[in-house]
Image: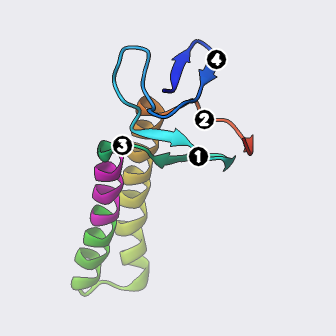
Amino acid sequence: MTYIDHSFVFRQQLHVYPFGMPLWFTAKTYGYGWTPAAWQGWVVLALYVALSFGTFVAVESYSLSEKESVIVFAPLMLLYTVVLLFICARTGEKARWRWGK
């Protein structure tokens, strides 16, 4: 089990918060970021992809110029990404650069 006790991380089979709640996201082995570790994490990631795709389709369905499409699409994608990163940070392991192990 993974327990986060202040700055110490112990890894075993199940990834769990100190309070007994499962981690939704675990840290990547290499680099910076997270990967889904529980079904809740996969649902959050699927919602992010679905919202991104749905937004793209909705923006493209209107007869907007390329500039107008970017003006509408970019802020929404920025919002979705910030929300995703916030959820990952709140429900996952501490983010830091990792070189493996």
Q: Nearer the viewer, residue 91 or 53?
A: 91
Numbered circle sitting on residue 95: 2
Horizontal and vertical percent position of residue 59? 28, 76
Rounded to the nearest whole Å, what is the CA distance between mark 1 and mark 3?
16 Å
Q: Which residues are magenta?
A: 41-50
Q: Is residue 91 left or right of residue 39?
A: right
| Callout 4 amino acid | Phe
Magenta includes 47? yes
| Callout 3 amino acid | Ala
Q: Is residue 48 above or below residue 10?
A: below
Question: Is label 1 in a helix, a strand or a loop?
Answer: loop
Residue identifier under label 3: 38
Question: Is label 2 in a helix, a strand or a loop?
Answer: loop
Horizontal and vertical percent position of residue 14? 44, 33
Magenta includes 88? no
Question: Is label 4 in a helix, a strand or a loop?
Answer: strand
Which residue is depicted at the point 33% across and 24% down?
21
Question: Is label 3 in a helix, a strand or a loop?
Answer: loop
